[in-house]
C-alpha cells in the first residue's frame, strides 16, 4: 500500500533536518523551515481568525530589491507576521523583515526570527538585502506605533530619521507603501504598567480589557477583520546613490511615504467598516 504523499514529504523533511541537509543564508534564513513549518502555524490566524484580505498585490515587484514600508500597531508585532504571510502566499515572494534588537536578545524567539528571514533593523543589513534583490519589510514607527494607546489608533507616529529611504536610494530599490488595518483592535491598549516594564527591560507592558485580568487567556488576540493594501511603488532609481546622504531629500521622501501610508489607512479603514462586523 502506498503511503500518503504528505506523510512521505513530512518524513523526507525530517530526514533532511536530522541529517543537516538544508541551507541557510548569511543572515540565518532557512527557507524550507519557514515555508513548511513556521508559516503553516501562522496561516490559520491569517485565513480564519483575522480573515485577511489583500489589495494591490500587483504593486509589489515580482523580482529585484524592493522595500515595503508599513504602519505598525497592535501591542505585539503580529502585523509583521501577517505581512510576511501575505507577501509569501499572495505576492509569491519571501519577505525579509527588519526588526528591533530586542527581538534578537530573546531566547528561542530571536533564533526563530533569524530562521524565518528577519534581521536587525540597521543600515548594513538593509543595504545588503536590497542590493541582493530581496523583498524587505520595515516598520518605521517602531515601538511608538506598536505600543500606542487605543485612543490613538490609526494615527501614524513619527517615521524615525528616514534610514529606510536612504537604503532604498543606495540600492535604487522602489519603496512600496503598505497599509495594515485590523491590528489596532487585537489588543486594545488602555493602560501601561511602566514601572514593571522598566524592570523587565521592555518598552512597555500593556493593560488591555483582557490582560492581565484573564492571565494567559488575555494574550489571545481579538478576531478583528484585517485588510492589507500594497500601494503604488515610489521610485528611487532616478537618484544617484550619493543622494542618500542628502538629509533634505531623505526627509522629503520619508514624509511622502508617511503621508501616503496615512492616506491609505484612512481609505482602507472606511472600506473595511466595523472591526468585528463580519465575524
Image (cartoon, rainbow, N blue to C red):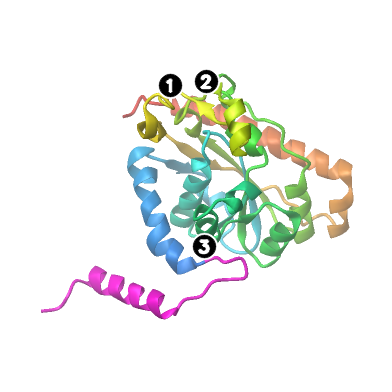
| Residue 45 visible (yes or no) | yes
Of residues 8 and 278, the one drawn nearer to the viewer in this rendering = 8
Marks 3 and 1, how far apart at CA: 34 Å
> Which portion, as a residue range, is magenta?
1-29
Residue on which disc 1 sits: 209
Marks 3 and 2, how far apart at CA: 34 Å
Query: x, y (%) of residue 190?
Result: 52, 20
| Residue 145 visible (yes or no) | no
User: Residue 134 occupies which quadrant of the picture?
Assistant: bottom right
Is label 3 in a helix, a strand or a loop?
A: helix
- Which sits earlier in the primary sequence, circle 3 or circle 2? 3
Marks 2 and 1, how far apart at CA: 7 Å
Q: Residue at x 54, y 21 (%)?
A: 191
Q: Is residue 154 above or below residue 137?
A: above
Q: Is residue 136 above or below residue 22?
A: above
Is label 1 in a helix, a strand or a loop?
A: loop
Is label 2 in a helix, a strand or a loop?
A: loop
Judged left or right of residue 44, residue 236 is right
- Which sits earlier in the primary sequence, circle 3 or circle 1? 3
Q: Quadrant of the C terminus?
A: top left
Query: x, y (%) of residue 171?
Result: 75, 60
Determine which of the numbered discs, if any, sits on residue 115 in the image: 3
Determine which of the numbered discs, if any, sits on residue 188 in the image: none
Judged left or right of residue 157, residue 197 is left
Q: Residue farthest to the left?
A: 1
- Within the magenta stretch, is there residue 17? yes
Q: Residues within 10 Å of mark 2 (few under 14, many from 20)?
A: few
Determine which of the numbered discs, if any, sits on residue 190 in the image: 2
Amino acid at each position: 500500500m502506498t503511503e500518503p504523499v504528505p506523510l512521505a514529504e513530512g518524513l523526507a523533511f525530517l530526514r533532511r533536518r536530522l541529517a543537516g541537509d538544508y541551507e541557510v543564508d548569511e543572515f540565518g534564513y532557512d527557507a524550507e523551515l519557514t515555508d513548511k513549518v513556521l508559516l503553516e502555524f501562522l496561516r490559520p490566524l491569517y485565513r480564519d481568525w483575522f480573515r485577511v484580505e489583500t489589495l494591490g498585490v500587483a504593486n509589489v515587484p515580482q523580482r529585484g530589491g524592493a522595500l515595503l514600508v508599513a504602519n505598525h500597531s497592535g501591542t505585539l508585532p503580529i502585523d509583521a507576521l501577517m505581512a510576511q504571510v501575505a507577501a509569501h502566499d499572495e505576492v509569491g515572494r519571501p519577505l525579509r523583515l527588519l526588526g528591533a534588537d530586542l527581538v534578537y536578545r530573546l531566547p528561542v524567539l530571536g533564533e526563530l526570527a533569524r530562521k524565518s528571514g528577519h534581521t536587525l533593523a540597521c543600515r548594513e543589513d538593509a543595504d545588503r538585502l536590497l542590493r541582493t534583490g530581496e523583498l524587505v519589510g520595515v516598520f518605521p514607527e517602531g515601538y511608538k506605533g506598536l505600543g500606542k494607546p487605543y485612543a490613538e489608533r490609526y494615527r501614524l507616529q513619527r517615521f524615525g530619521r528616514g534610514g529606510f529611504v536612504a537604503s532604498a536610494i543606495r540600492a535604487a530599490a522602489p519603496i512600496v507603501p503598505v497599509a495594515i488595518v485590523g491590528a489596532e483592535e487585537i489588543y486594545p491598549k488602555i493602560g501601561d504598567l511602566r514601572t514593571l516594564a522598566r524592570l523587565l527591560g521592555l518598552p512597555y507592558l500593556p493593560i488591555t480589557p483582557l490582560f492581565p485580568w484573564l492571565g494567559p487567556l488575555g494574550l489571545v488576540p481579538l478576531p478583528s477583520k484585517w485588510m492589507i493594501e500594497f500601494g503604488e511603488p515610489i521610485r528611487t532609481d532616478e537618484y544617484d546613490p550619493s543622494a542618500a546622504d542628502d538629509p533634505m531629500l531623505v526627509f522629503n521622501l520619508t514624509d511622502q511615504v508617511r503621508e501616503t501610508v496615512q492616506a491609505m489607512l484612512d481609505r482602507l479603514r472606511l472600506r473595511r467598516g466595523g472591526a468585528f462586523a463580519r465575524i
